[in-house]
């Protein structure tokens, strides 16, 4: 079965049901398998020979397969320990992406066997795991911690404490090491995806942590790009297998160069990247007519009832400004509670009455999303600009709001598996955004 027919949820079901991810046939994507094998080797050697505290960093662009790699490592190690030693919990998967955890726990718990029954034990939100073990002498059962999107670890200010979440995880690791004489923490780092307050330090929050007394004696493994970041660590092992720089989400078509060129206002580069995307079969259209976009998607669905689609929109876009420009006015904003996000991805997305913001869709994907530029961020003819009132309202909440909103659109634009429609509402300030997209090669619908 080819990987391209699977989304994250389907691939995870396949993994926990059959013990493997769908086969990756494209030779360029063999990097994921190389990364997984290397991570498993680090874990194994640490357990049987090295007996150390190992902190491993894996970097990757959006859509590079970080979460799938993380889940494969989790599954393989737990299966190995369960089969050989009847140990039910040896590795744990942590994420700040609560919607993803909620969906995976529910689906795996309902549909998969022995390992699936323990989904709530080994698939955990960072928040629940942290509060269980902070200031608690209890020693976790696991000796491997897989932290997905570890760049989202909260800083001290967000924690309202003198410790960051990175500090907390390393202290938990210390407890595990004292009990089991080995611990491996694997941090998957997504690039350019900080969208919350308290998450803007990224990889540097880990650099700070390993410089603190009492938690500074970790053996670091990282890709070449982080060599200088961890130059002062006790020991550093550099390996290029710890970097996933190629997006495999979109039919094995790398969309990351197009996205980065677009957000850098480098439209010539975007045009060249887009030519290759089109040649490989990626569908990309832009329109100012929402109903036309909807009709286009519905025709796709007539040919394939199983396709997934829905509206993606920035949480910073003002609902009252876009309400009557989306779905004939039957639009009720992008705010969703955790359980509503699961419902949205399981069917409500197809009604277009609610959009999924960057918070809801980060780490998840759709076959054909409609990505709306909601007027919060637009191209003014020279550079990308934040609408002044939105900037005024949000700037004090973030260290660098310009970077945050760029990251928001990076997340929104990287959710597509097979194709994407970009919807530019009829607002004067969005005229040049539409023109720039067309001039950079995006086909009009």
Image: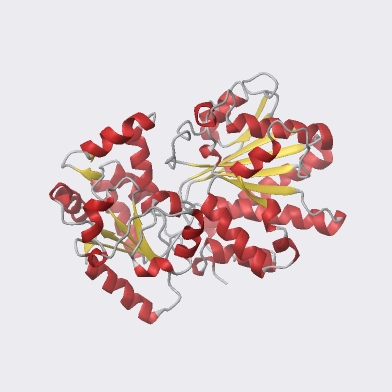
Left or right relative to 295: residue 129: right
Location of the N terminus (image quadrant): bottom right
Q: Position of residue 359 (x, y in %)?
A: 44, 49
Q: Quadrant of the C terminus?
A: bottom left
Q: Position of residue 253 (x, y in %)?
A: 42, 59
Front-most of residues 165 and 55: 165
Is 329 left, or right, of 310 in this rendering? left
Say whether residue 93 is visible: yes
For residue 72, side relative to residue 413 (left or right):
right
- Quarter of the view holding residue 137: top right
Q: Can I make out residue 52 in this image?
A: no
Q: Is 444 drawn above or below residue 386 in the view shown?
A: below
Residue 310 sits above or below residue 62 on the image: below
Spot the residue most to the left: 428
| Residue 186, quarter of picture | top right
Residue closest to the far bottom: 302
Q: Nearer the viewer, residue 159 or 91?
A: 159
Query: Residue 399 appears at what percent x and percent y?
Result: 39, 28
* Residue at point 57%, 56% (across, down): 102
Which sits in the foreground, 338 or 113? 338
Give coordinates of residue 319: x percent, y percent: 28, 52
Q: Residue lying furthest right in this view?
A: 85
| Figure check: 83 above or below 362 | below
As drawn, 163 above or below 283:
above
Q: Residue at x 52, y 54 (%)?
A: 99
- Relative placement, left or right, of 7 versus 187 is left
Question: What residue is shown at x 68% (from left), y 43% (from top)?
Answer: 145
């Amino acid at each position: 079965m080819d990987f391209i027919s699977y989304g994250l949820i389907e691939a995870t079901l396949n993994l926990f049901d059959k013990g493997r991810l769908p086969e990756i046939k494209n030779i360029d994507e063999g990097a994921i398998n190389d990364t997984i094998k290397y991570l498993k080797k680090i874990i194994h050697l640490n357990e049987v020979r090295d007996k150390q505290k190992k902190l491993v960093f894996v970097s990757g662009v959006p859509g590079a397969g970080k979460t799938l790699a993380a889940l494969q490592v989790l599954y393989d190690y737990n299966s190995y320990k369960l089969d050989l030693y009847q140990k039910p919990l040896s590795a744990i998967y942590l994420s700040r992406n609560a919607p993803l955890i909620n969906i995976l726990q529910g689906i795996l718990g309902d549909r998969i066997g022995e390992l699936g029954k323990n989904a709530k034990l080994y698939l955990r939100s960072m928040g629940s795991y942290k509060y269980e073990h902070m200031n608690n002498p209890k020693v976790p059962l696991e000796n491997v911690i897989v932290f997905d999107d570890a760049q989202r670890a909260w800083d001290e200010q967000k924690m309202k404490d003198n410790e960051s979440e990175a500090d907390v995880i390393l202290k938990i690791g210390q407890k595990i090491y004292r009990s089991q004489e080995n611990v491996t923490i694997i941090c998957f780092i997504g690039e350019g995806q900080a969208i919350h307050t308290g998450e803007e330090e990224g990889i540097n929050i880990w650099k700070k942590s390993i410089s603190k007394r009492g938690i500074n004696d970790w053996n670091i493994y990282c890709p070449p790009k982080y060599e200088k970041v961890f130059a002062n660590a006790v020991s550093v092992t550099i390996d290029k297998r710890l970097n996933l720089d190629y997006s495999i989400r979109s039919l094995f078509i790398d969309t990351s160069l197009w996205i980065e060129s677009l957000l850098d206002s480098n439209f010539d580069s975007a045009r060249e990247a887009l030519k290759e995307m089109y040649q490989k079969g990626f569908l990309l259209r832009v329109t100012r007519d929402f109903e036309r976009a909807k009709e286009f998607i519905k025709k796709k669905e007539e040919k394939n009832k199983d396709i997934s689609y829905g509206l993606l929109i920035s949480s910073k876009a003002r609902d009252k400004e876009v309400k009557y420009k989306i779905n004939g006015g039957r639009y009720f904003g992008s705010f969703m509670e955790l359980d509503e996000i699961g419902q949205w991805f399981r069917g409500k997305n197809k009604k277009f009455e609610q959009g999924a913001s960057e918070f809801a869709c980060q780490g998840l994907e759709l076959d054909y999303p409609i990505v709306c530029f909601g007027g919060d961020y637009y191209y003014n003819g020279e550079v990308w600009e934040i609408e002044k009132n939105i900037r005024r309202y949000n700037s004090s909440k973030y260290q660098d709001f310009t970077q945050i909103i760029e990251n928001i659109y990076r997340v929104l634009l990287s959710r597509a598996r097979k194709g994407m429609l970009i919807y530019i509402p009829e607002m004067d300030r969005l005229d040049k955004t539409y023109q720039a997209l067309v001039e950079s090669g995006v086909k009009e619908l």
